[in-house]
Image: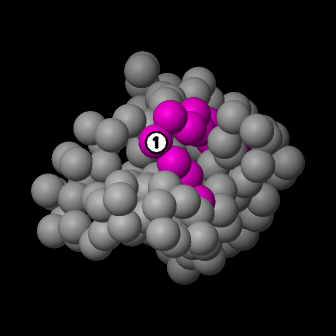
Amino acid sequence: MHFESIFFEDYTLEDKRTTLGRTITETDFVVHAGHTGDFFPHHMDAEWCKTQPFGQRIAHGTMIFAIGIGLTASVINPEAFSKGYDRLRFVKPVFIGDTIHAEVTISEKSDAKKPEFGTVVEHVEIINQHGEVVLVADHILLAKRKETTT
């Protein structure tokens, strides 16, 4: 992790980066359930899950979002900040032992309300060890411009 100034003009449409992987563990399930209070049997009851369509416990979607987005946090950019996420979807289940990584593509750039900033959208795909997309979201950034004309 390091600091790097990346201004609105520095973002290029279709630029892509790929993160390292992270294997999902049973400890992740237990800790996330404790943090959120989501102890639904889909995540916590292995025997009950054997009677369900997936046959095993499935990861909390919010946990996969948090871990997957955490994987993208490799550069601290003092010139931009997150405005949030749009179009979040849980595409496929994630199981204990699956390894996920993130692929981030700059998908949109536009003017912001304040002329000294621009809006950048990073399309994020979380992908499992089989190459399957398990989660998608659009990360919206507000990035400073190098120079503004008023």
Relative to 144, does residue 97 appear above or below in the rendering?
above
Q: Residue at x 20, y 47 (%)?
A: 31
- Displayed quadrant of residue 35: bottom left
Total numbered labels: 1
What segment carries the magenta color? 93-104
- Displayed quadrant of residue 93: bottom right
Please indicate, yes or no, whether residue 103 appears anywhere in the rendered image: yes
Relative to 118, does residue 131 appear above or below in the rendering?
above
Q: In the visual, does 30 lie left or right of 87? A: left
Q: Which residue is drawn at 33% across and 40% down?
A: 26
Residue 23 at x, y percent in the picture: 49, 31
Residue at mark 1: 96
Q: In the visual, does 62 lie left or right of 146? A: left
Q: Is mark 1 on a helix, strand or loop?
A: loop
Q: Does the magenta stretch include residue 17?
A: no
Q: Does the magenta stretch include residue 103?
A: yes
Nearest to the observer: residue 131 or residue 77: 131
Residue 135 at x, y percent in the picture: 62, 60
Residue 81 at x, y percent in the picture: 42, 54
Residue 123 at x, y percent in the picture: 69, 58
